[in-house]
Image (tube, rainbow, N blue to C red):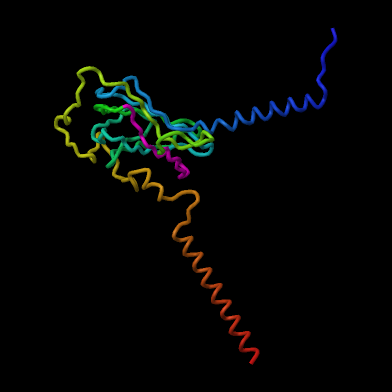
Amino acid sequence: MSRITLPRTARRLTVAAATATTAVLLTAVPAAAHVEVESDNAQALAENVELDFSAASESATAGITELRVVLPEGIAPSEVAFGEGPKGWRFTATDDGYTVKGPAVKTGEDAEYSVVVRQLPDVKELAFKTLQTYSDGKVDRWIELGKADAGGHGNEAPVLKLKAAAPGAKPAGPSPGKSPSPSASPTPAPEETPASSTPQAADTEKDDGGLSAVAWTGILATILVAAAAVLFAVRRRGTGRQ
C-alpha cells in the first residue's frame, strides 16, 4: 500500500495552524480571571448561609493581598461574619460591605475565603462588587453588572443566583443584642481604615496610568523654567541688535 505524503506547503500550513491554535488557547487563560461566589444553600430568605468566594489571580509577579466587597442591597455588613480564608487574613466591616486582607498569597494562586450571612434577601440574584488588590499595588475591579466585553475579559461582578424562598419563609428580625448599624464589625478589626469604601470611589486612587501631584509639580516647574529661558534669550538678542 502506497503511503500518502502531504506536499511541503500543506505540511507547513498544518504546523502553522496548530501553532496558532495553541497560542490562542494559551492567551485565553488570563481572560478567565474573575471572582466567583457560590453556596450550597443559595435560596431566598435562607438563614445562616455560607458563601464561598474564589478570586482568580491575574498576575505572574505579585500575590493577592486584599479583597474589598460591596454588599448587595438587603444584606447589612453587621449581618456578615468571617468564615475561613488565607492564612493570616482578617475581616473588617465597612460602611457598605467588608474587606478581607492579609499577607500576599503565593504568586499565581487564587485567593479563597468564606463568609456567613445571617439571612439572604428575597431576590433572584445577588451581585458582590469586588476590588482585588495585589502586593505590587495593582487593582482588578470586578464591579460591572451584566455581561463581560466582547473579548471575554471584562470586569463583571460575581453574582449568586438564588432559588425561590421556601414556603412559609419570612424575613428575620434584627439580631438579638446587636446593633443594626451598618458600620458594626462582626469580628475584631485592625485599626487601619481603607482609603475608600466603594469600588467607584477607589477608581480615583493610585493606578498604573495616573500621575502623582509631585510629578505634575515637576512638569509645571520644567515648563516655567523653559519659558523663562526663552524670554531671556529673546531679550538678549533684542539688546544685541541695538
Judged by its main secondary structure, the magenta piece is strand
Q: Position of residue 26 (x, y in %)?
A: 60, 30
Q: Quadrant of the N terminus?
A: top right
Residue 232 in magenta?
no
- Residue drawn at 82 percent across, 25 percent down: 8
Q: What is the magenta range? A: 124-142
Q: Within the image, what quadrant is residue 242 found in? A: bottom right
Residue 139 in magenta?
yes
Q: Position of residue 4 (x, y in %)?
A: 82, 14
Q: Within the image, what quadrant is residue 228 found in? A: bottom right
Q: Position of residue 165 (x, y in %)?
A: 26, 21
Q: Nearer the viewer, residue 106 or 116?
A: 116
Give the side of residue 193 with respect to residue 230, left or right: left
Q: Nearer the viewer, residue 147 or 106?
A: 147
Residue 188 lies, with reference to residue 231, above or below; the image says above
Q: Position of residue 186 (x, y in %)?
A: 24, 34
User: Which residue, as the protein is rendered here, is positioned at the far top?
Assistant: 1
Residue 124 lies, with reference to residue 3, above or below; the image says below
- Residue drawn at 33 percent across, 38 percent down: 70
Q: Within the image, what quadrant is residue 236 found in? A: bottom right
- Residue drawn at 49 percent across, 39 percent down: 62
